[in-house]
Image (cartoon, helix red, strand yellow):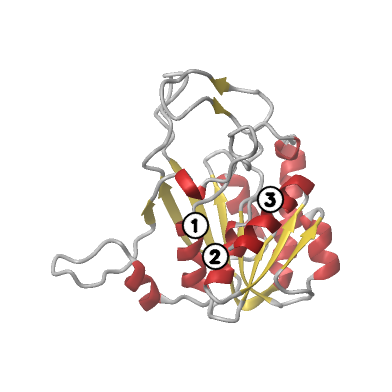
Amino acid sequence: MKMNTIYKGDCRKVLKDKIPDKSIDLIFADPPYNLSGNGLKWKNKGYGGDWHMVNEDWDKMSEAEYLQFTRGWLAECKRVLKSTGSIYISCTYHNIGELIMTLKLLGFTPRNIITWHKNNSMPSMTKRIFTHSCEYVLFFSKGKNWTFNYEELKKINPEKAKDGANKQMRDLWVMPVCQGKERLKNKSGRAAHPTQKPEELLKRIILASSKKGDVVLDPFLGSATTAVIAKKLGRKWIGIESEEKYVKIAQKRINES
């Protein structure tokens, strides 16, 4: 098992072939949400440029295929996690049910469902539903003695008590979708990766559930936010990514961080 390395390939196979049992302290996963296929886009919407819904081959599966895929990678994640380890999974209402049931069937224990309120979310295109302004992060542990750095989180919590004292961090996190200098762009000016996560999101997760020198694994590395923040915080990291174009983007970002 190589540290601070991106493995290219299907995470199920890479986990099985490259990552030993009980070797990982923390997993953050941003798996496919299985939403692609309709090619929705919103041109000339008036602010922030044109919008295109995620439409990638890796994000297109039947319900049966998606359940099988979910069980496959989560079973491998459980195998490689230490007994003190935790897994955090980014999701929306579209796939939260499949993830929670699979995690529970595999023997993981729920600790929190963190609500990420995106305070710069896009308004509803159809005007037939409430505006989607939230994603979720599932926090499950493998065993009873999971790592949780309570005091560290109080220090970085932007919310303070009335007297200015540090306050417990709640499971409601308010932060914008990636924007400005943090957002990676391709040559055409569009987002280089469709689901890039904010650095602040990973900072909180990594500080919460790992210690310096621990190993953080991301089985869907994408734009490498997990690796970049793990590196900044003194953790070792391992990333897995199936798409060559994202491996190149991720490696360049890590090298420059």
Which element type, helix, strand or loop, lies under badge 3?
helix
Residue 135 x %, y %? 48, 45
Asked whether the viewer can see residue 135, the reply is no
For marks 3 and 2 on the same chain, the one whose residue lies earlier in the sequence: 2
- Residue at 33% of width from left, 72% of height from top? 154
- Picture layout, residue 49 above or below residue 24: above
Distance between mark 1 and mark 3 Cα atoms: 16 Å
Mark 3 nearby-residue class (10 Å; few <14, some 14–19, many ≥20):
some
Residue under numbered circle 1: 199
Q: Nearer the viewer, residue 170 or 231?
A: 231
Identify the residue under disc 2.
Answer: 229
Tally of numbered discs? 3
Marks 2 and 1 close (CB-CB < 8 Å): yes
Q: Residue at x 65, y 54 (%)?
A: 102
Q: Nearer the viewer, mark 1 or mark 3?
A: 3
Q: Secondary structure at mark 2?
A: helix
Question: Which residue appears at 44% of the width and 34% of the height?
Answer: 132
Mark 1 surroundings within 10 Å by alpha-carbon count, few (fewer than 14), some (14 through 19), many (20 or more) = some
User: Is residue 230 among the parts visible in the rendering?
Assistant: yes
Marked residue nearer the N-terminal end (1 or 3): 1
* Residue under label 3: 249
Residue in the foreground of this view, choosing between 192 and 95: 192
Q: Amino acid at mark 2?
A: Ile
**Alpha carbon distance from label 3 to label 2:** 16 Å
Q: Quadrant where the C terminus lies?
A: bottom right
Residue 246 % position (x, y): 71, 48
